[in-house]
Image: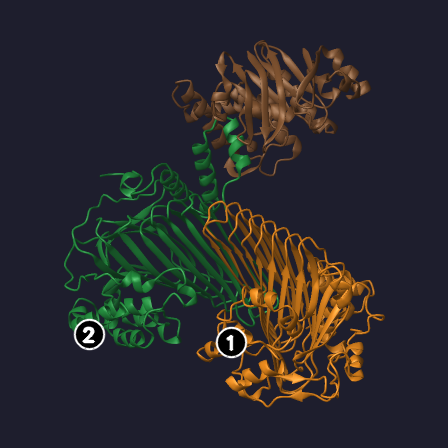
Chain colours: A green, B brown, C orange
Amino acid sequence: MSSINQYIDLYLQHADLLNQGSHPLINAHRAAALSGLQTHGLPSRKDERYKYTDIDKALAPDYGLNLQRLSIPFSTRYQCRVPGMRSRLYHVVDDTLAGGDILDTPQIFVGPLTLFAERYPEKFKKYYDSESESGKSNALARLNTMLVQNGIVVFVAKGYKESDLLQFINLSAGGVPMLTNRRQLIILESGAEATILACNHSGSQIDHLTNEVVEVWQEEGSKLQYYTIDDTVASDSILNTTHIVQSAGSRLEYASITLSGGLARREVDIYLRGADASVQASGFVVGDGEQHVDNNLLVVHDAPACQSDVLYKYILDGQAVGAFAGKVYVSPGAEQTDSQETNANMCMSPEARMYTQPMLEIYADDVKCNHGSTVGQFNDNALFYMNQRGISPEDGRKLLQQAFAWDVIERIPLLPLRQRLMRMVESRFRLADSCNDCGICISKV
Amino acid sequence: MLEIQNLHASVEGKEILKGINLHINPGEVHALMGPNGSGKSTLSNVLVGNPLYTVTQGTITFKGKDLLAMPAERRSHEGIFMSFQQPVEIPGVSMNSFLRAAVNAKRKYMGQPPISGAEFLKLIKEKRQLVGLDDSFTRRGVNEGFSGGERKRNEIFQMAVLEPVLTILDETDSGLDVDALRIVAEGFNKLRTPQSSAICITHYQRMLDYLRPDVVHVMLNGCIVKTGGPELANRIEEEGFDWLKNVEN
Amino acid sequence: MSQSPDNSIVRNIADKEYEYGFTTDVETEIIPQGLSEEVVRLISAKKGEPEWLLEFRLEAFRYWQTLEQPSWGHVDLPPIDYQAISYYADPRGKKRGPTEIDPELEKTFNKLGIPLNERLALSGVAVDAVMDSVSVKTTFKQQLAERGIIFCSISEAVANHPELVRKYLGSVVPYRDNYFAALNSAVFSDGSFVYIPKGVRCPMELSTYFRINAINTGQFERTLIVCDDGGYVSYLEGCTAPMRDENQLHAAIVEIVVCQDAEVKYSTVQNWYPGDKEGKGGVYNLVTKRGLLRGDRSKLSWTQVETGSAITWKYPSCVLKGNNSVAEFYSVAVTNNHQQADTGTKMVHLGSNTRSTIVSKGISAGHSQNTYRGLVRMGNRADGSRNYSSCDSLLLSPTCGAHTFPYVDVNNPTCVVEHEATTSKISEDQLMYCTQRGIPPEEAVALIVNGYAKDVLNKLPMEFAVEAQKLLSVSLEGSVG
């Protein structure tokens, strides 16, 4: 029996409780999500995009949900400050904003999803879950929509440029195995700008699954930098569905960095719907132990003269499994498309596995599309050269790993953030696991 | 300083060195000549500890220590430096982080604390000026996109930073690349101290015009068949190696 | 000139018809349409097959009945009415003995450029000519037999070398492999059988020419090539069909076994009738081709030039089981008008230090869809193995599609896999440059496309490379825009 049924049952039994703990505008979407789930169920590994991750298995444990909206204590030891950058820090425990100043001005809103629904119902209705009916929703998004109670909204009004880094520290918490359905809604009106960093950490060693949906709306000429980092523990899993719609002339820099954790799967769909929109998507994965990291990317060129540039790199050790699938889809009429996709991977141990699948689907002719992927190891000659200069094989390998990572990190335009990420990666190579030991996040205990 | 006795070595199961004996004193420059396939490069690779080469017999003592017992990086820490004929590109690893790792590894081996950032920059700047390289150079990846001449200059620069006691100049096939030869030889001469020794591997007399070796060895078929002064090199330049083939037995 | 050069080409080029679209008027024995156990038994009886082969067919047929036609490829394959097809057509007529050949048939093959008379034949090429369900003639059989080489139709092989056929048939492509493999295993008609004994280098190119003639028939080619230790053979396959409004089905299986230190080169020039400009008619070319590199240091190379068929569904694959085995796949696939091609390869590395190379060039024009689909898998014992893949697509019209779906699975850290792909429009600069030098646009396109496909064409045996080049130009005429 499909593991989705336990969540459907749970919803049918506790819909009232769910609704009470949320907002009517959020509640209004549950029924459609339920019926979608009942009709389509969960994807299986026979479905092309789910070949490498068993969703049914991921959802099979008997997770609890915080339906009662109990407040869960958390530690603010995760500061994750980025030195040299002005930032606004928010702590999000599971799906609830638990620390940080809510911003609610005509220019910008940063706060809970429920509050946004209350204050700006028209805007909420315009954007929230608005593409689910055009067949662009997946089962995990439906599950989220059916069960979500809260989340975070970043809204930047027309022409406003937020210069502070908006930093969200997402903590999974709770004393029992839990499923969190978190929602992020990010809206940039025309000409708006923002930089967002979302760090995922674990508040405990207890099994936790986060089923997260991120919806991003970028209107004409807006500019968004969105970075997400997984630095969690093996008991922590994340299933993320990110849906991004870009209008003409908008710019997006997206990066996802997975340093540690259990299962991490991201399905990121980016729709370039207006001419001359551009996206740069980057990913870096360091996996060891039994980590399973699956990045499934779709970039749809729906309008002419858009650019996409995708670079994902994996370093896998232990029994880690890495998967990358990236499809660039060029619709009829999307002429002058310029697209590039690269996936490079290093397997360091006999048991590490890598699956890669860079795809092109092209229905226009005036295009320039390239993709490439490699799986391999480090160059022995380079290692020996370093040996000869007195650098031990281990250190040599670390240097090469850092260099391998650097390509990706280098793409992040903000210097302080770039340096911070590089240090995180460096420290990841020094210490095998557990972010709690790395000392990077804990600037103040 | 370096004592090689009855050295036999093979690569991929094939014996290349068949009993090499060689003695080098501090301050001496030795030239190693010989036609292709005579074993010159194998000898240099064995000296620096390239794992692709297997020593089957014999000993190498360096400064009184058993060199063959040391991994490649220890040999480097002890002061052996090889100027590679074709230095490999290591994209993404900047010269700065590469050299800092090298310097610190050696310091650690000598029981010294790691070099501070400021000290390191000072060191790099000083050596850079010594070999005439500009500032942008150290920010690039190791040999990444370097021209042939730049790579050679980079080898000399690293030699300046690491201050070896025994330098192996591998110029086996670059006999026609006069610039490369000049850069390496002049660089070595500039950095040379009364204690520093070198082994220079080459086909050609030209390299030796720059280096002026104290001793010249000729290798044939895995053995040193003739040892002499600089005049030996001149004879090889005029007559080639053929006359030596009879000497072999 | 106000139009870009490629636009003017569309207007200027006179449409060229499919050159091989004629039919042969020959008395043909066709069994009634429809597929059932009875039909399978009838085919087997007509061919006078032994009991074990009938069993093999029946098992496959029963299995096939449990399957549904697959829909996963990037092609729009309409449901096929398997009851509306005749599964056996013999154009040899009833009156003649097995050694005589109907002059009509000989004329047909002459017209196709395949003389069956050994004196007129291309020097150094032995041909097995198959029309509809039957091998019409195999040339140079005697000369080959002197060296112990067996080259004959598979039906003959069943009769004369049953032990070899029984040992290898279905050993590389079992009938359970896929839907069309099961269908073929049940009803296969004719194809070639090649056996190269130990240490023998085949002195001439072997070639099979397939021709579908009869109306409403399917062709179920079955080819089996076994190259024993240290042997070598180069094999070429060519095919054409008449122009008919109905779709014709060609569901083939090619199995190749390459033993230790042996080498097989398999080249295909596929020119089945592609249908007309509106996409009416044409052959459905649904093929399973696979080679097993069984022995150490064995080598297999697939080269294909695909220009025909309405729908192509074909992945010549290699299982690199022997250590140090080497596999290659070189492909040029051209689609025009409403053709759909979903083609590529699978390289499954099992042994250590194995090497594979994939070079695929897709050229899409008109309203066609051209897909490269490939798998490279490194098994956990494939230490030190490497693959290099390069898949390029060239687009000649705004209404065509070019797709690349490579799958890479690496289960061994000592392997190196590299894949790269590019998709781009035919260069206007190159076209302009050519036309400025006085080369007519349509010739310029042919020139550029041939240059683009050169890496692959160079892999073909000389005699066929020239033919393939011509074919590429013809396939694209009237297409560029």
**Is disc 2 in the same subunit as disc 1?**
no
Q: Position of residue C335 (x, y in %)?
A: 64, 72
In the rendered view of the protein, which quadrant contains the C terminus of chain C?
A: bottom right
In percent of the image, x 59 and y 66: which residue is there? C163
Near-viewer residue (A344 or C140): C140
For this view, does A194 lie left or right of residue C244? left
Q: Chain of mark 1?
A: C
The quarter of the displayed image where residue C203 is located: bottom right
Residue A196 shows in the view: no
Q: CA distance from mark 2 to mark 1?
A: 55 Å
Amino acid type at mark 2:
Leu
Amino acid type at mark 1:
Glu
Q: Position of residue C329 (x, y in %)?
A: 62, 59
Q: Chain of mark 2?
A: A
Vertical comparison of B123 with C249: above or below: above
For this view, does C46 lie left or right of residue A208? right
Q: Residues within 10 Å of mark 1 (few under 14, many from 20)?
A: some
Which residue bears the numbered disc 1? Answer: C55
Near-viewer residue (C457 or B8): B8
The quarter of the displayed image where residue A108 is located: bottom left
Do the CB atoms of the residues marked 2 and 1 lie less than 8 Å apart? Answer: no
For this view, does C210 lie left or right of residue C340? right
